[in-house]
Structure formats: C-alpha cells, structure tokens
Amino acid sequence: MTARDATLSDRPSYRWVPAIFSMELRKIFSYRMDFWLQFVGGFLAQFVVSYFLWLSIFEFKQAESVGGYSFSMLVGYYIFSPFIDRIVRANNAFVVSQEIYDGSLSRYLLYPINYLGLRFIATLAHALVGLLQMAVGVAIIFGLWGVPEGVQLTLSGILMGTVGVTVSVLLYYLMATSLELAAFWADNVWSLLVMLQFTTAFVGGSLVPLSIFPEWAQDALALTPFPYLIGYPVQAFLGQLSFQQWLRGIEFSLLWTLPLALVLVIVWGRGRSSYTGVGM
Amino acid sequence: MIQIENLYKTFRIHRKAPGFVGSLKSLVYRQWEDRHALKGVNLTVQPGEILGLVGANGAGKTTLVKILAGVVRPSSGRVQVNNLNPWDRKNSFRRQISLIMGQKAQLWWDLPAADCFLLLKEIYQIEEGEYQKYLGFLSETLGVSGLLDVQIRRLSLGERMKMELIAALLHKPRVVFLDEPTIGLDLTAQKAIRKFILDYQREYQPTMILTSHYMEDIEQLCPRIVIIREGQFVYDGQLKHVMSKFADHKVLAVTVEDPQLVVDAGMEFKNSVYLENKEGVLRFRAERQAVASAAAEILGRLPVKDISIEELDIGHIIEALMRRQERLAP
C-alpha cells in the first residue's frame, strides 16, 4: 500500500494512540504550578482532614479499631486513598461536556480517529502521572515517617493495586463520560457529575473505608461498581487483599465495564445525531 | 466533487420566557420551536472549483459547511463529497477533507504549533519525509517558520490563523472548507491569508468552499458565489455576473478647480446625475452603457483636473440581492 493509499483507506490506524498519550503528558507538564499543586495540595487537604477527624474519633471512642482498622492502618489508608481518588477521577471532570458545549468537539469529529478512544487515552496519561506522583509521594512519606503499623507493602500488593487502579480508571471513565454526554441534550451536566463524584467519594472508599459500613450495606454495595473504584485498589496496595479476593474484584469490575461501555456507545451515537457544533 | 440535493436541516430550539417566573415555568414545561437552517438547497461544486458562500449571520452558511464536513447530521436530503456521504464519517472521507473555522481555535492552545503538527502527522499517517518537506513549504510560505515552537496561546490572531491553515492542509486534503478564515484579522494579515489561499488553490487544486463576511475575500478568491438567505439560495452563479446584472450604473468621480462653484451653479447633465460633493470630489451616477458619453459631457463642460470611473461596491449589490425574495438566474 502506498503512502497515498494509506491516507485514503477506511482502515483505522492507531498511530495516533502514543501521540495523543504523549501530547497529554506534555500538556500536564506544561503547567508546572498546577502539577505541583495537585501533587502536594490535593494530597495534603484530604490527608490532614482525615487524619485529625479519625484522631478525634479514636480518642472519643477510646477504641482499638474501627471497622477492622487500627488508627495506624487508617493512616496508611489515607496516605493512599487521596492519590488513588485523584488518579481515578482527575481527568473526567467536565472535559467532554465542555467540548460539546463550546463546539470544540467538532475538530475531533473531523479527524480519522475515535473520539471516545482519544479521551480514554488522554485519561490514561493523567492516570500514569497520578501513579508516578503516588509512588513518589508514598516513598517520601514512608521514608520520613516509616511504614504505618499493619500496612504490608509488598511487590505483589503493589502490582495488584496498580492493575486494580487501571481497571478503576476505565470503570470511572465509562460512567463519567456517559453522564457527560448528556451535554448533547441538557444545558448543564454539572449536577450529574457532582452527584457521581460525591457517590464515588462516599461509597467508593475515598472518604471512609467501606468496612465502616454495616454488613448489609457492604453486601449491597458489592453488587455495584463503586467499591472497586477506590477502596479495592487501596486495600490491594495496603496488602489487605488476598490474590483470590483481588481477582474476584477485578473480574467483577471488568464485568461492569461491558454494560457501561454499551451505554456509552449508544448515548454517543444518539448524541452525535443531535450535535449542532454551536459554541458558546 | 460536491453534490447536494434537496438538503434540509432543522434545529429544535428551546424558548424560555424572560425573568424568574419564566425560569420556574421552564422547569416543568418547555416550549420548543423548530428552526429551519436549510430549506431544500441544491448545489454542485466541481473538483478544483472554489466557491464563495455569502450570507448574513444565521443564514445557514456554517450549518451547510458543517454538514458537508460530516460534523452535523442533515435532517433530510442527499449529500455527496467526492462520492462519499459525509455523515457516514468513514476514515477515507475524513482523510480527504479539512475544515478551518476562523472563529474557533482547532489547535491545542497549551502546545507549541510544532507539537500540534506532529500529532496531526500521526493522525493522518503522513510519512516523515513528506511531512518535513510539506511543513517546511507551508511554514515558509506563510512566514511562520520561526514560530513553530511557540505555544499557540501566545501567538497573535494572524499567526494563529496561519498555523490553523498549516494544520488543515498538512494531509493535503482534496476538499477544503474555510469558514470565515480572515475574521478579526488586520488588513495585512487578511491580505497574506488571501494570497496564500489563492496560491495554494492554484498549485494543488483542491475543491474549496469559502464563507466570509469580507467582500474582499469573496472578490479575490471566488469566481463563483452562492448567496444564501434564511436557509435558501437566492443566487448561484459567477461573481462577475452579479456586477453586470445587478449593478446597472457606475459612478464618475470628478475633481475640478472649484467644486462648490459647480454645485452652486446647479448644472444639469444629459447623461449623468449629480450625486454629491465628497471632500472636494464631485460624484455623478451614469448608466453603465452611457458612461463614456457622460464622461465626455463632463469633460466638455467642467474644468476637470481629474476624472475616474468607479464600480459600485459589490458588498452593497450583494446585500441588496440578499433582500430580494425571488431566486435570481445567474
């Protein structure tokens, strides 16, 4: 096939995948202040609040553990959860809906690439940066304070956690993007996304470990994709999951991706038909 | 080749009464209205042709261009661009078209132009050698070679538009849609962009559709124009025919020793009508076919220092044409 034939063929090309990934990384690095603020500020805000909140709870209750967590294990939990929370949710806030509202989606529709694929690749780039930030952050904290008691940082735990968080990125991307596509019809999708973010924070294991909830609630939540978003990867990193438990979580997460992906594709197809390309 | 048959596009618009009560009401009951952006238009554009699409704001120009580019779905009708239906959005279609929107940045603001072009190279699968050669040619021609490593957001509007042009042409599209490519630019930048488009079209012969509010763009670039009004074509034909068909007179601009004296004398001319004294230059209107005799009469009766014959402004003619209801033959 000649170069000209290639440019005119219908066959999809994936040469853009590493290019988009690299472009997204360059975009992230081009905003130095934002990069460091997210790294330090994002972590500190959530960690400090959680630390003092749980300190008061433990002092007030005079308990050894809450929901199976000792105070030092909770410290370990809240070292990981702000980072994982950021990795899973960071790049899914209003990007797609904004592109629909301001008409900048049009340029992507002109290119011979898959827009939803492009957005996911961009999300993966953000996730990679988040993972690296977490590795550096955790290394610094554990280096200075030592590993909290009860936390078992092992290579298998790190691997399971990394795979887990990657699957979580996919799950959250599917959920958030489906909601963002409501921008094809609705004047504002802000509230929908905030609801998703709040739900994820609350029942996904970002605000509190899910073992704090009563058992019936944990059983019910286990049927939804939410516990696998943040709580599971955090537990994997902390060495609290056996391989079997981790595998079950991954299988369940991947099972959820099928209907979610189907919804996304259907909503995208419908939405594209009503797209006007008009910017604000 | 572009072929459009009986093309309609209707948008559904939400109407809301003003004020707080209107907002409350819209929570439970919404009033919708159909807005017909295109009403059964037909068009054929030959390969290598450059067509000017002229019309007021909201006339349907951009909607038509977006339908042709496969961005917006038509309500009904048949559209073919190089024998492909744009709405199918096949890769083979998207690889041979390009859309430049003067009012909307299409490059990534956070990145230098060179990075944006590298990404487009991968998206369009352009070979390295061909890419380097063509990028060099485009950036040299547009005079922006030294700006390729500057973040897009830090470029001036004119420089940004030049980068947009490079981005749109890197993959050598066979069909180029230019939606207001010179909007907001200063005169020098407008001129440079126009010259580039003209040279590019002559060299590579892509089919081009250009929309613009600047008549100079249309006059210099488009031998053929379509005037669109409220979703319908009111004129489709050669630009020069617009002048001869609808501008039935010309203006004679005459400089004399003492213009006020001539005005005060209230002189009347057989072949022309006095219009005004504009900054010491007297202007007369003459029928197109009587211009020579009108000029001779003025030269014979007035102490003329200088005389020139002016065409009417094509913008005014087209504006007048846009107000007409009936379809006009070319």
Image (cartoon, rainbow, N blue to C red):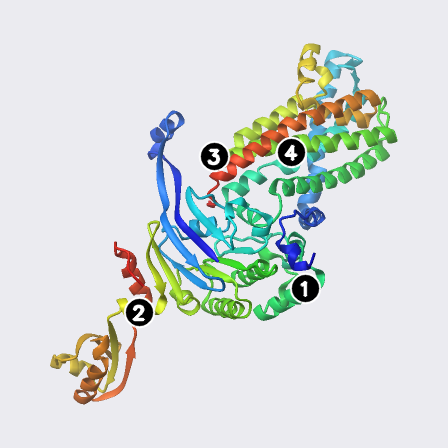
Q: Earlier in the sequence, mark 4 or mark 3?
A: 4
Q: Label 3 to label 2, Cα distance in Å? A: 45 Å
CA distance separating discs 2 and 1: 43 Å
Can residue B280 be seen here? no
Q: Which of marks 4 and 1 is in front?
A: 1
| Mark closer to the observer (3, 1) | 1
Q: Mark 3 lies on which chain?
A: A
Mark 2: amino acid = Met
Q: Quadrant of the N terminus of chain A?
A: bottom right
Please state which amino acid type lies under the numbered disc 3: Trp
Q: Do the residues labelled 2 and 1 touch (CB within 8 Å)?
A: no
Q: Taking A152 as reference, is A108 above or below it?
A: below
Residue type indicated by callout 4: Tyr
Dot 2: within a 10 Å radius of its alpha carbon, few (fewer than 14), some, or many (20 or more) residues? some
Q: Position of residue A198 (x, y in %)?
A: 61, 26
Residue pictured at 48% horizontal, 68% vertical: B194
Query: In the structure shown, which secondary structural element does the residue marked by tag 1 occupy?
Result: helix
Callout 4: SS: helix
Q: Are marks 4 and 3 on the same chain?
A: yes
Give the residue at mark 4.
A173
Q: Distance between the residues labelled 4 and 1?
A: 37 Å
